[in-house]
Amino acid sequence: MPDLPHTAAALRAVVADRTVSAEEVCRQTLERIAALDGRLHAFLHVDADRALDRARALDRLKVPAGPLHGVPIALKDNVITRDMPTTAGSHLLDGHRPLYNATVVDRLERAGAVIVGKTVCDEFAMGSSTEHCAFGPARNPWALDRVPGGSSGGSAVAVAAGLVPIALGSDTGGSIRQPAAFCGIVGLKPTYGRVSRYGLIAFASSLDQIGPLAHSVDDAALVLSVIGGHDPLDATSAAGQPFEAAGGRRDDLRGVRIGVPRALLETGVAADVTAAFDAALGVLTDLGATIVTIDLPHSRFAVPVYYLVATAEASSNLARYDGVRYGVRAAADSLGAMYDRTRSAGFGAEVKRRIMLGTYALSAGYYDAYYRKAQQVRTLIARDFDTAFDAVDLVALPTTPTTAFRFGAHLDDPLSMYVADVFTVSAPLAGLPAVSVPAGLSSEHLPIGLQLVGRAWDEAGLLRAAGAYERRTPWAGRRPRVLDA
Ligand code: GLN
C-alpha cells in the first residue's frame, strides 16, 4: 500500500473515488498512532473500534457522505463527544462520558469525517505548553525535549507528526495558532461567533472559538466550511455569515495592503523569529502586497487585559465544578467516584491560580479597578484594529516571540509563560479571525509561524492571502525528521 496523501482534501479524493477504502485509511491511521504515540503522547484517548465501525459504514454508502468523506480527525479533549471520554485535561472530569455531541462533532460526522480520538490539552485549555494537562504533556515532534505549545498541543502534534491529516483545537488567547507555529503547521482561529461553542467546555466564553489545525490552508478552509455557520444552540453564533471553502484561490496579492505594527515588535522577539518574519514580508511583497507600518497603540496592554478578562470568565465558568456549593455531595451516590476525585485530585495549580485571579478581579472592591478597566481597554484594542482596517486589509505579526521552549522553562514563573502570548491575545480580544502558517525553521531546526489577522468575517480574504504565501514558500507540508529516525 503506497503512502496515503497527507492532506484531508487529497485523502478525501482517493477515498471518494474508491482508490482506497475508508476502512484502510482508518487502519493505517490507527497503526501509525500505535507506532508513534508512545513517544509523542498526542492522544488521551483513541477509539479504534468506533472509528473502524464508522469507516466501514462510510464504505457501504453509495455516494460520499460529504467533503470529509473518510478523513480521520482528532479532537481536542475539551470538545464534547457522546460516549467518548471528555476530560478537558482535568482529573475533575476523569471518567466523564458525555451524553451528547458538540455541534462541531455532529457536523464533522455528517461531512464524513472519522473521529479517531481525543487529544492532550492543558487543563481547561489554560496554558501554552500542555504541561498543565493532568495526564501529562504532549511532545513536540520536531524536538522531543520541547513543548508542542498549547493549549491545543496534542492536536497540533497529531497533525504535525502525520497521525491524522486534520484536528480541532480551541483558541481563547492563542491556543490554536501558537501550537500550530511551534509544530510547523497551519492553525486558524475563526471570527468570534463563526463556529458554534455548543459542547465546547468553556474557558472564557467571550473569547473561546473552535478551529482547525491542518497541513495546508486549503484544508483549514475545508474544515471551517464544515464546522462553521449558525447554530441555534449557541446564542453567540452568528447567522448570515456564510463561508465557502472554494472562495477563490489567488496566486498573487496585488492590491492587498498588509499592516505591520512595528512598535510592538521592537523588543523581546528572538532573532530567528524576526529574520523569518522579515523574510515572510519579503515574500508577501513579491506576491504584490503592499506592506504598511501601522500603529496598534493599545495592544501593548493586551496581555494584562487578556489575563484579567479570561481569568474573570474562567472563575465564573468553573464555579460549576465546585462540588461543595453545587451539590455534588448531595448526589454522591451516583456521582461518588467523581466526588472522590474532586476531593483527592481537584484542579491543578494553574487552574486554581486562574480562579483566584479571576475571583479577585471580579470582587466588589476591585471590580472597577481591574475587570471594568480591562473591558474598557479591550474596547480600545478592538478600535485600534478598526482604525487600522481603514488603511489595510490584513495585519501581519509573528505568531510567537520565540520557537518552542524546553519542558519546564516557564513552570516556576507563570508570568513568563503568560507574556509569551503577546502576539496572539489581541485577535480574540477584538473577536477577529487569525491564522498561523509555517514561515521557516530556526537555526535549531524548530518551526516559526507567520500570523495574519483579518477583518471580522473575512476568513475568505485572510485564507486567500495565507494560501498564496504558503504556495510560494517551501515550508508547507515539511515533516519533522525526528520521527523517521
Ligand atoms: N496561553 C493562553 C492561556 O494560557 C491561551 C490559552 C487558550 O487560548 N486556550 O490562557
Image: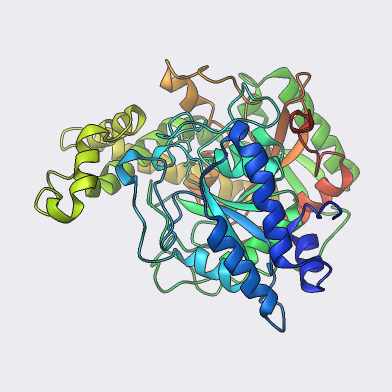
Q: Quadrant of the C terminus?
A: top right
Residue name at image x 82 percent, y 73 percent:
17
Number of numbered tags placed on the structure image: 0
Q: Is residue 42 left or right of residue 63?
A: left
Residue in view at x 88 percent, y 54 percent? 252
Q: x and y percent of residue 73 in the render? A: 62, 56
Q: Residue at x 68, y 19 (%)?
A: 270
Taking the image as drawn, is residue 209 in sight? Answer: yes
Q: Kindly indicate the quadrant of the structure image that contains residue 346.
A: top left
Expressed as whole percent of the image width and height from the top left, the position of residue 35 reads 67, 40
Give the vertical position of 316 relative to 194 (above or below).
Answer: above
21 shown above or below 25: below
| Nearest the eye: 300 or 279 | 279
Report the quarter where the N terminus lies: bottom right
| Picture quadrant where residue 445 is located | top right
Residue 475 placed where, x, y %?
82, 39
Q: Quadrant of residue 306?
A: top left
429 left or right of 404 in image: left
Rendering coords of residue 269 (x, y %): 65, 21
Q: Nearer the viewer, residue 23 or 102?
A: 23
Vertical placement of residue 12 versus 32, above or below: below
Q: Is residue 49 above or below residue 362?
A: below
